Image (cartoon, rainbow, N blue to C red):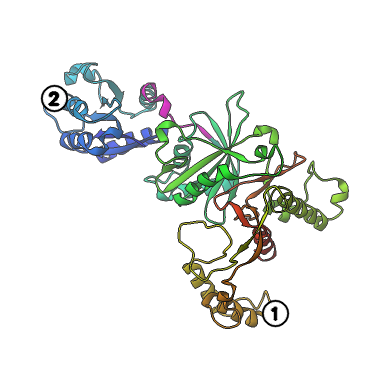
Amino acid sequence: MKHVIIGDSDDEHFECICKIIESSFNLNVEPAKSIGEILKKISSPKGAEIKLVLLTEHLPYSANAMRAYFERCHGAERGADRDNHCWIGLVYDGNNPYSRLNLNSDICEVSLPYPSCEEAERLFRERLGAIFGDLKLPDVTLANDMQLKVQVDELAKHWKRNDGEEVLRRLLGGFFSISLMVQRLRSGGSGALVFRVQPLSLGQDAQYLIKFTEDKWKLKEEAKKHPTVVGGTPDYRRYTAEILEPKPESQRDGHVVRCGGWYAICFRFLGGSSFGESVDLEEVLTGPARRMACLSSDDMPTLEAYRTRILSIVLDWLKRHWCANTKYTIRLDQQPWTTVDAEDNAYESLPPYTLRGDVKYRIRQFIDGPKAGESLLSNWPQLADFVKGFVNHTGSGDGSKMNHHVSMILSPAHGDLNANNVLFFPELQDPIFLIDFAMYQEHGHALQDFARLEAEIKYA
């Protein structure tokens, strides 16, 4: 992230300038209340990240002192160990700033009017855009969707201003500078937010998916594993998303960009708008029947038959591409379970199945709660004792009895195949499109995706 230093002793004055810059450009603004503080920042190890220093007339200065301030800033900039140029400029309040402050264009490289009115604000953005056009944030239009607005507002919780749209634009600005339409895709069970993004420019047919989360490590895992995803048909890559490189100035952590406490990764749908609209499996299985190119009228005599047919399409897809595809399946002796706690902040290949320590604790808390599962299962007390033994390694459910090797079929596995990670494109004959490959395994237990979907559909 590139930085702007604003020398201003007036907090309200600074905040006005800061808001305009950060809402228009992918720049991080920092305050400095004195010339000494400015020089210290320029000369610091992080000084190479500073793209612009703006002095204001609210800095304490005497006659002709402003020119001396500029000269000292230029001297510090030249003396710093940096590969790029740092612009030194002025935000002025009145007229004729150069003659009034004894400055010229050689020493003051950019002059911006204080944005006290609409015209001054327009000039401020225009002049700054002439220098930092590559850092301009995209114009974003939100789809008319109340749930989308709620999700975007959530992005503001780690930001200095209560403005989720500003955070959205800054994260999107790590990848785009063009005008964009943003639509809600879904909110993941892990707290991730996923949006579908479409350029509004003429001739731009591409469609994108952008994912936001507070857990950077999850996105880094997804970026690492995404290129390893395989499929059982020659055009399989048409049905996966291509990971997108951030813009060079935003590329500090591989494919992941950051704003405040949020991290983002972006993918491009290879089919573009020709795929048509999408809907996730949860909505297909819980909403009304809808027309799909892959279904005939015989598949939809009743709502139950329609949903059953939809689910069979998903399961057949998994078998065809992964778990029953002899190109990828292998049989090996594997340990199905380990009592050792799983590592935090890591996705491990299964088998062996395992649980993190905090998950075991939550299971025990749930079981010990008041009649936790009796409304779901008639034999809950016996099952609860078994599960508790499995977690605690005691009694008939002792999981340690599975600490031995058995013959198992391994295949590619998604690893987190919930109903939000399966997208349907109703206009396609082959409508399945999977997302979120952070837990993908090249050689995982062949039935884990089926088990994950079964548990969610029955009990979630």
Rendering coords of residue 83 (x, y %): 29, 27
Left or right placement of residue 4 versus residue 149 in this view = left
Q: Indicate which disc residue 51 carries.
A: none
Residue 25: in sight, yes or no?
A: no
Say whether residue 35 is left or right of residue 118. left
Q: Quadrant of the C terminus?
A: bottom right
In the rendered structure, the answer to whether residue 242 lies left or right of residue 176 reads right
The residue identified by callout 2 is 68
Q: Earlier in the sequence, mark 1 or mark 2?
A: 2
Frontmost residue, 77 versus 38: 77
Q: Position of residue 204 (x, y in %)?
A: 60, 26
Judging by the rendered image, the residue that carries numbered circle 1 is 378
Helix, strand or loop status at disc 1 = loop
Crowding around mark 1 (Cα neighbors within 10 Å: few <14, some 14 to 19, many 20+) is: few
Reply yes or no: does residue 339 show up in magenta. Answer: no
174, above or below 65, in the image: below
Instruction: Read off the magenta span.
Output: 129-140
The image quarter in which residue 195 lies: top right
